[in-house]
Image (cartoon, rainbow, N blue to C red):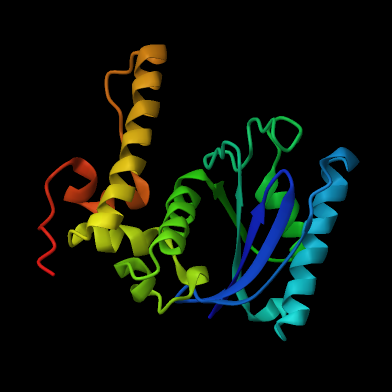
Amino acid sequence: MLYLGIDLGGTTIKAGIVDEKGKILHKASCVTGLDRGCEAVFQDVAALAFRTLRDGACTMEEIASVGVGFPGIWDAEHSCVPYCSNLKWPDRFPLTEYLGKLLGKTVYAGNDASATALIREGRRLCEDKPDCALMRSVDGDLEQIEARSVIDLAKVGDPDCLELFEQYTERISEGLVSLINLYDPEVIVIGGGRIACGGVFTGASPPKDSG
């Protein structure tokens, strides 16, 4: 089963075909060109998606679904982007519906910040320490690093990945403190993949690396 991932940024649009294990099979990119307006940008997103499929010897019929990450808020309940100043979209923009019509495929959307932060820092770690456990876990292929790659090693006490993950959770904590100061909520509910991190996220000490 294959999937198409799209990273929609203010400077560059990237697209990639991945398999069910997350391995990147083919990728391509183009300039975003925000000044041309929302409609022109999404025409380019669609064109890039089809070009990526064509160059990767794949068809849209082989794609199970499309995922798009972007630097903005995603309202899953109403399937829209309430506001996204970075990309200059209209308020309450129906991202998945609009792009789905252009691609003829179901589209899922979400903010790209949380996962890409760990991926970016993980790749930087591997560049600085090419003999680290994270580099070995992906057989030296930086493109294969995912947020889960860092988390799994942090869970078993790898000092490098644990330090990265502690920095990540510290930044989340700082953001939550700001929200508390602004809105004084009674309860904060944290969901998604972070819950699967278990004790490494909630503060319990993971086992020390015995190696």
Residue furthest bottom in the image: 57
Q: Quadrant of residue 71?
A: top right
- Residue 2 or residue 209, whichever sits in front: 209
Q: Is residue 147 above or below residue 40?
A: below
Image coordinates for residue 171, horizontal then vertical, percent: 37, 34
Task: Give the left or right position of residue 135, taking residue 6 as reference.
Answer: left
Residue drawn 60% across and 37% down?
72
Residue drawn 13% across and 54% down?
206
Residue drawn 10% across and 58% down?
207
Q: Is residue 17 above or below residue 182?
A: below
Image coordinates for residue 65, horizontal then vertical, percent: 59, 67
Total number of numbered discs in the rendering: 0
Task: Give the left or right position of residue 182, taking residue 83 as reference.
Answer: left
Q: Is residue 81 above or below residue 101?
A: above
Residue drawn 84% across and 55% down?
43
Task: Give the left or right position of residue 45, taking residue 84 as reference.
Answer: right
Q: Is residue 147 above or below residue 35?
A: below
Which quadrant is home to the C terminus?
A: bottom left
Task: Give the left or right position of residue 179, taking residue 75 as reference.
Answer: left
- Residue 90 or residue 72, whichever sits in front: 72
Image coordinates for residue 24, horizontal then vertical, percent: 56, 75
- Residue 1 or residue 101, whichever sits in front: 1
